[in-house]
Amino acid sequence: MKRSEINQILKNAKAFMAEKQFILPPWAYWSVDDWKNSKEDIQEIIENMLGWDITDFGSGDFYKRGLFLFTIRNGKFNVDKKPYAEKIMIVEENQETPMHFHWAKMEDIINRGGGNLVIELYNSTSDEKLDTTPVHLKTDGVKRTVDAGGKVILTPGESICLEQGMYHLFYGEPGKGKVLVGEVSTVNDDTSDNCFYESIGRFPVIVEDEEPLHLLASDYQKFI
């Protein structure tokens, strides 16, 4: 992805979050110099990869297959005491996050406002294939069952609990607008706890055609 494309996605995301009155922590807007000057005090942010996160999953087309995320808080396995994580995401209409599950993480996905979020679900087999068995789940604490490959549509305010090993793919429902999506989970490790059904890239290779508007979590080692 080009840095200019990432910068524009960031501008659009900030405008949408402002519209929905979702406020990020102050360090979200720091300059590179601010990061460097605070380096000794922000190791949790750097090591636990808090902050801006944009990916096209290697597709080359962010708006067809991609995701905007901001990790607000996160622990780290066997390092610190924090056992939980929280993210905010923006999902465009028909913008796909590919089919995947997590070995360790259990998460609630919450529609925080905007359009509707469509989630397609499968159980996983012992060899990490798509199972054909019905998927048992809960939405806002209410038990539900869908067929393998079935869809759950979350309207604003609704949530779904995704257990370990549960394959899920999601996108914004066409014609309903982009979606502000929350995630509350156990500790999140995007470097080792994502099992994608297809072989894809989680973090983008960035072409530096202009200066960063804000650093991504994947930028910290390069710029700080």
Image: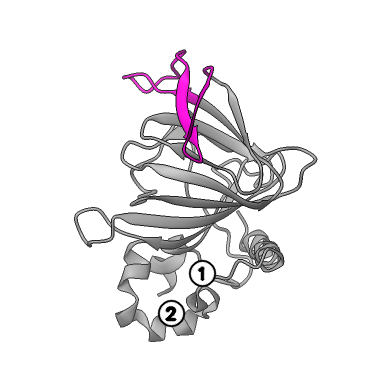
Badge 2 marks a residue whose secondary structure is helix
Badge 1 marks a residue whose secondary structure is loop
Label 1: few (<14), some (14–19) or many (≥20) C-alpha neighbours in 10 Å: many
Label 2: few (<14), some (14–19) or many (≥20) C-alpha neighbours in 10 Å: some
Instruction: Verify CB contact (< 8 Å) between mark 1 and mark 2.
Output: yes
Q: Nearer the viewer, residue 180 or 217?
A: 180
Residue drawn at point x = 31 percent, y = 72 percent: 43
Task: Check disc 1 and give the amino acid type.
Answer: Leu
Residue 143 at x, y = what percent? Answer: 47, 29
Task: Check disc 2 and give the amino acid type.
Answer: Trp
Q: What residue did someone put label 1 on?
A: 215
Q: Nearer the viewer, residue 4 or 173?
A: 173
Which portion, as a residue range, is magenta?
122-148
Residue drawn at point x = 66 percent, y = 64 percent: 4
Give above or below for 167 relative to 4: above
Residue 12 as seen in the image, left or right of residue 203: right
Q: What residue did someone put label 2 on?
A: 35
Q: Nearer the viewer, residue 198 or 135?
A: 135
Residue 215 at x, y = what percent? Answer: 51, 69
Residue 217 appears in the rendering: yes
Give above or below for 212 relative to 184: below
Residue 131 as seen in the image, left or right of residue 63: left
User: Is 183 in the magenta?
Assistant: no
Give above or below for 63 relative to 46: above
Residue drawn at point x = 50 percent, y = 32 percent: 168
Cα–Cα span, label 1 and label 2: 9 Å
